[in-house]
Image (spheres, rainbow, N blue to C red):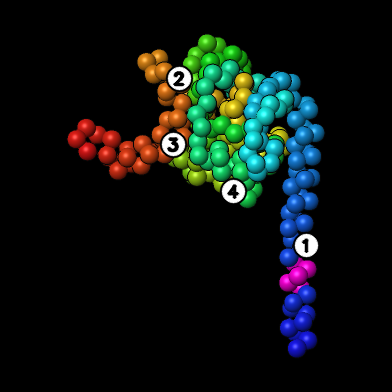
Amino acid sequence: MYIIILTFFIAIALYYIIPSFFSSKKIKEKQLSTMLEKEHLVKAIGWAARDPSAVLSPLEFSRRATRERDVQFKVLYCGICHTDLHFMKNELGFTTYPIVPGREVVGVVTQVGSKVKRFKVGDKVGVGCMVASCRQCDQCVDDLENYCAKSIPTYNGVDTDGTITYGGYSNIMVADEHFIIHWPETMPLDIGAPLLCAGITTYSAMKYYGLNEPGN
């Protein structure tokens, strides 16, 4: 009987203590991120959700100054992925608010780092669902960065400097050139943006199984 009562009280305690612990940890992480973000030099504005209602409103924030291998670009279009809605509503349970979604981002390069070789100012570019990875693990070496345990998503992730990543529902993006793609001159930016997430998710599987060849 005593064991049942003790188990009951332990269960009640865990029910209240564990969520409180993770909530407190999340608040501390957000406070640290906000403090670090103030050190960023590039002022930006985006559309952010501030709670699970998913109502978007303007948010002023800062992006990091362009590092030696970074590409900064002006966002012209950004597709709406259903994952954006999941995160805005916190349906996956780990959204950090405020959240600026957007993972199908296209625009024109405005600045490049000193060691960037593949891009120049004026190039049309895009970035998809991730902006960084460790670049050293087996997955990264095999060009499968999306399986990297340390990959950093375009939004709602923790960047290498400890700040929260913000997505393409904004006017400016900054990312390592390795995760930026050249945009085909013959493809309209607005029409092609969704290919950077939903489109590539489908095409990648087709290519893997050889279904992208004519007649298949």
What residue is shown with label 4? 91
**Disc 3 to disc 2, how far (Cα)?**
15 Å
**Disc 3 to disc 4, how far (Cα)?**
19 Å
What residue is shown with label 1? 17
The earlier-in-sequence mark between 3 and 4 is 4
Name the amino acid, label 4: Glu
Residue 5: x and y, percent? 77, 82
Residue 77 in the image: above or below residue 134: above
**Disc 3 to disc 1, how far (Cα)?**
39 Å
Residue range (magenta): 10-14
Residue 59 in the image: above or below residue 12: above
Residue 101 in the image: above or below residue 183: below
**Disc 2 to disc 4, how far (Cα)?**
30 Å
Name the amino acid, label 1: Ile
Is 6 left or right of 48, judged from the image as shown?
right
Asked whether residue 182 appears in the rendered view, the answer is: no
What residue is shown with label 3? 198
The earlier-in-sequence mark between 3 and 2 is 2
Quarter of the image holding residue 52?
A: top right
At label 4, counting other C-alpha atoms closer than 10 Å, the crowd grade (few under 14, some 14-19, many 20 or more) is: few
Where is the N terminus found, in terms of image quarters?
Answer: bottom right
Prevailing secondary structure class for the magenta stretch in the rendered image: helix
What residue is shown with label 2? 189
Where is the C terminus found, in terms of image quarters?
Answer: top left
Residue 173 in the image: above or below residue 149: above
Badge count: 4
Residue 125: x and y, percent? 49, 20
The earlier-in-sequence mark between 4 and 1 is 1
Query: Which residue is painted at 46% across and 26% down in the image?
Result: 193
Q: Residue 34 versus residue 120: which sits nearer the camera?
A: 34
